[in-house]
Image: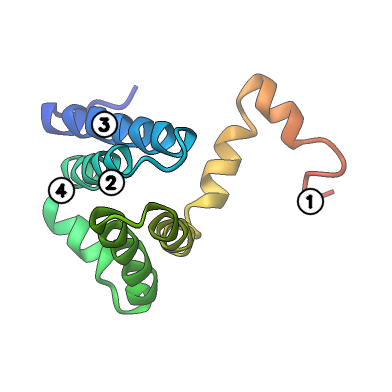
Amino acid sequence: MISLTDTQKIGMGLTGFGVFFLFFGMILFFDKALLAIGNVLFVAGLAFVIGLERTFRFFFQKHKMKATGFFLGGVFVVLIGWPLIGMIFEIYGFFLLFRGFFPVVIGFIRRVPVLGSLLNLPGIRSTP
């Protein structure tokens, strides 16, 4: 079991609530207030989990500047009141930022009993 500090536990809670508010805001036809709250909680939770310095280093690496611009620009666009356009920017930036992490997530999901069997179906799996 991974041991987490109290700060990391708070960060996990903030990130979880952020994802919940983002999801709920999209379900309620891109409610800008819920999306704005979700954005703030998600970014704050990330900073609590990995630390402020590592968060800045992650977002502002030279090869991730385009992704960071789209993600944080999308957050800004949501905050000024254009939720649909902002979420499109955010989702694009999110995929650019975390594309190196997706294979790790898929490898983890393959070990989960029900989801793993779905990902190992012949049409879905990428390796024979």
Element type where label 2 sits in the image? helix
Between 115 and 67, the one lying in front of the other is: 67
Indicate the position of residue 105 as horizontal and vertical percent values: 53, 42
Mark found first going from the N terminus, 3 or 1: 3
* Mark earlier in primary sequence (3, 2): 3
The residue under label 3 is 12
Q: Residue at x 38, y 59 (%)?
A: 86
Q: Is mark 4 on a helix, strand or loop?
A: loop
Q: Distance between the residues labelled 3 and 2?
A: 14 Å
Residue 51 has which mark?
4
Q: Which mark is residue 39?
A: 2
Image position of 20 with respect to 40: above or below: above
**Residue sitting at 42 percent across and 54 percent down?**
87
Establish if 103 lies above or below 113. below
| Picture coordinates of residue 62, whole percent (x, y) | 30, 79
Residue position for label 1: 127
Identify which amino acid the numbered label 2 is placed on.
Asn
Residue at (29%, 39%) from the top-left corner? 38
